[in-house]
Image (cartoon, rainbow, N blue to C red):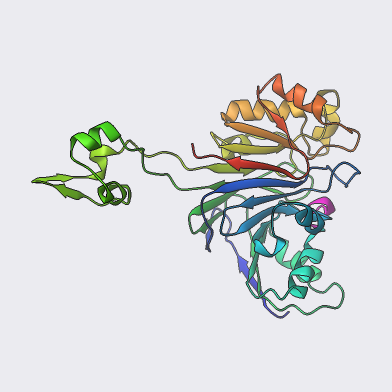
Amino acid sequence: MPHLCLALNPAGGGVIRGSASRRPMRLTFLGTAGSWPTKERSASAIALDTDREVILLDCGEGTQRQLFHSSVSFMRVRRVFLTHFHGDHFLGLPGLIQSMGLNNRTEPLDIYGPPETPEMVDRILKLGYFTLRFPIQVHALQAGATVELDGLTVRSAKAEHPVPTLAYRLDEPAKRGRFDEVKAHALGIHGRDFSRLEAGESVTVGERVVRPDDVLGGPRAGRSVVYSGDTSPTDEIRKLAHRATVLIHEATTAQELESEANAWGHSSARQAAELARDAEVATLFLTHFSSRYKESAPLEVEARGRFPGALAARDLLDHLIKQP
């Protein structure tokens, strides 16, 4: 297969190295439907724009058309993290790849997912007649694997679903603390000395050496995004989401259908909210809504009973993830 490169990540947390970017960081919900698209919602897909590139979390049917309706350029998609291979989470990938080729893409595309990802991508690249003009690098991940990017770490965890499914956490590194401006001025820090100290350098003021720790607070956690994929509630995902900036958790049904949802490897809005509360996340978005719900407001209300401020995502919603 031309331009196809496979990278198998060892079980138990092997590392794959690549490149990514940092701020600003924005989420765009391209599809929020569960199982199949509806008039109101497209199939599952979320774009994370890190300013220099776009990372897709799942790529359900219709994703590229949703990208055209959004503020996100499909040609800037650099990586795709697939949670599993039910059609509503990956069937948009063949069209996206072929459209990229028709638009003369030359940059590589990295695709990450469960262990069967290389086989599935190989099948995708044999669909129809087209010329693949750019490299595709495929990475098979086990639960617990870590992907080290430039300025971003991606961790995976096992989700509870009838087929092999991964949840993902994307983390920025810790950042230096904020300046104590009063203390800095008292020490005679002015002008470019601020940026030098922020960069980790020491500066000399008169006969005194001022170190970054003298004027900067303790390190601050970077931003983090957790995506559950399809799952019933699990301790693995709760641990993965611990104190995340944003948790995106599926909420296929309301509480009255909770047992049925769990039997099929899904969660209710109430369960998603309880997991978010127990994980102490800052922001919760619900997604993957069953087609029985024309409006998501009742699910949002149900979730807010356990996690005040919970939000039901909607197609083409943008959310800027602010610095903590």
Residue 89 magenta-highlighted: yes
Q: Along the line of sight, which residue is nearer the eye, 47 or 60?
A: 47
Instruction: From the viewer's perspective, tell me whether residue 38 is left or right of residue 1.
Output: right
Q: Count numbered badges in the picture.
A: 0
The image shows residue 149 at horizontal and vertical percentages of: 52, 58
Query: Where 188 sits versus 121, above or below?
Result: above
How would you classify the magenta stretch by its main secondary structure? helix
Q: Along the line of sight, which residue is nearer the eye, 105 or 257?
A: 105
The image shows residue 241 at horizontal and vertical percentages of: 59, 37
Q: Quadrant of the N terminus?
A: bottom right
Instruction: From the viewer's perspective, tell me whether residue 103 is left or right of residue 319.
Output: right
The residue positioned 41% from the left and 38% from the top of the image is 220
Instruction: From the viewer's perspective, tell me whether residue 224 is left or right of residue 198.
Output: right
The residue positioned 78% from the left and 48% from the top of the image is 44
Residue 6 magenta-highlighted: no
The image shows residue 84 at horizontal and vertical percentages of: 74, 52
Q: Which residues are magenta?
A: 85-90
The image shows residue 120 at horizontal and vertical percentages of: 77, 65
Query: Where 40 sits versus 202, above or below?
Result: above
User: Does residue 31 appear anywhere in the picture?
Assistant: yes
User: Does residue 157 appear anywhere in the picture?
Assistant: no
Query: Where 308 sits versus 84, above or below?
Result: above
Q: Along the line of sight, which residue is nearer the eye, 316 or 92?
A: 316
The residue positioned 63% from the left and 50% from the top of the image is 48
